[in-house]
Amino acid sequence: MSVHMAVLDQHFTLPKIRKVAANSPVLWLQRGWTDLWAHPGPSLVYGLLVTLMGALVLSLAINNPYLFTTSITGFLLLAPLGAAGIYELTSEREEGRPTSFVQSIRDLLANMGQLAFLGLALAMVAIAWERFSAILFAIFYGGQDVSLSGYLSSLIGEFLPFTIVWSLAGFLLAFLVFGLTAISIPMLADREVDSVTAMMCSLRATSENRVVMIQWAALIVLLTAVGFITVIGLIVIFPLLGHSTWYAYKDLVE
């Protein structure tokens, strides 16, 4: 179904969105990889911090099956905020300023108001998703005491209906959140705009480059999954995706 985005112009002054080539996601990753190793120290610090935080959340949820899977989804919802400092690193480098972890934090704090608003919105979405998952789990599992291993092994067996409903709901939520945050956070790091305008710009860029952005979203999910499986790989993959997203934003927005 066609999505008409012109109505946004009645309420927001948005920059022009470019149409990008089909191979853009691969180019973004290549440029992100180069940028990562231009200042590996501070970039990998962000990767390490996010990896430790993710590991902590998963360790706290490991004895609660629905919380374990929900926390993974919640990580994907909130992870874009963790990359905000990485965008500041790239912005500093493009402006010819010295790059460092401390300086990126300072630049991040300078625009904390709009980022906090966006973070609050994402946190509310994550909380709503956790409550929805809890209700859905209770409905399908009927109060059964299920271990994590039993839960995971039955996802495509006895509890296939739960898996289908939960996955469909998660996909729709992730699609919406991706549309709103695909380029909004790097835009906040780069320009003097409010978070609502940045999210509307992100939604428009995603809508006008649907096929490319679906490919980009799939790459993000795939690489994040590799990061979760290997754990230590997330230390590199997270900043790689952060730097690559910056170049996605630069290509998509004039």
Image (cartoon, rainbow, N blue to C red):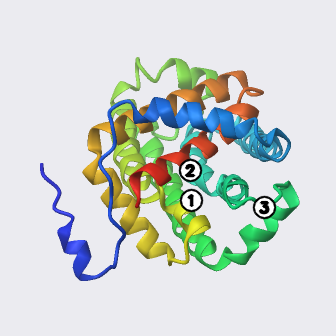
x then y, percent, for residue 213: 36, 42
* CA distance separating discs 3 and 1: 17 Å
From this viewpoint, is residue 80 visible? Answer: yes
Q: Closer to the camera, 64 or 146?
A: 64
Identity, as a three-letter code, of the amino acid under mark 3: Arg
Q: Is residue 135 left or right of residue 210?
A: right
Residue 92 location in percent, x, y?
A: 72, 60
Query: Which element carries disc 1, helix, strand or loop?
Result: helix
Amino acid tagged 1: Pro
Q: Secondary structure at mark 2?
A: helix
Secondary structure beneath dot 3 equals: loop
Residue at (54% x, 51% y) in the render:
77
Vertical arrangement, residue 195 with respect to residue 187, above or below: below
Labelled disc at residue 97: 3
Tell which circle, 3 or 1, labels the residue nearer the N-terminal end: 3
- Disc 1 to disc 2, how far (Cα)? 6 Å
Q: In which quadrant of the rendered view does residue 71 lie?
A: top right
Give me the residue at 26% from left, 52% from top.
208
In the foreground, 143 or 132: 132
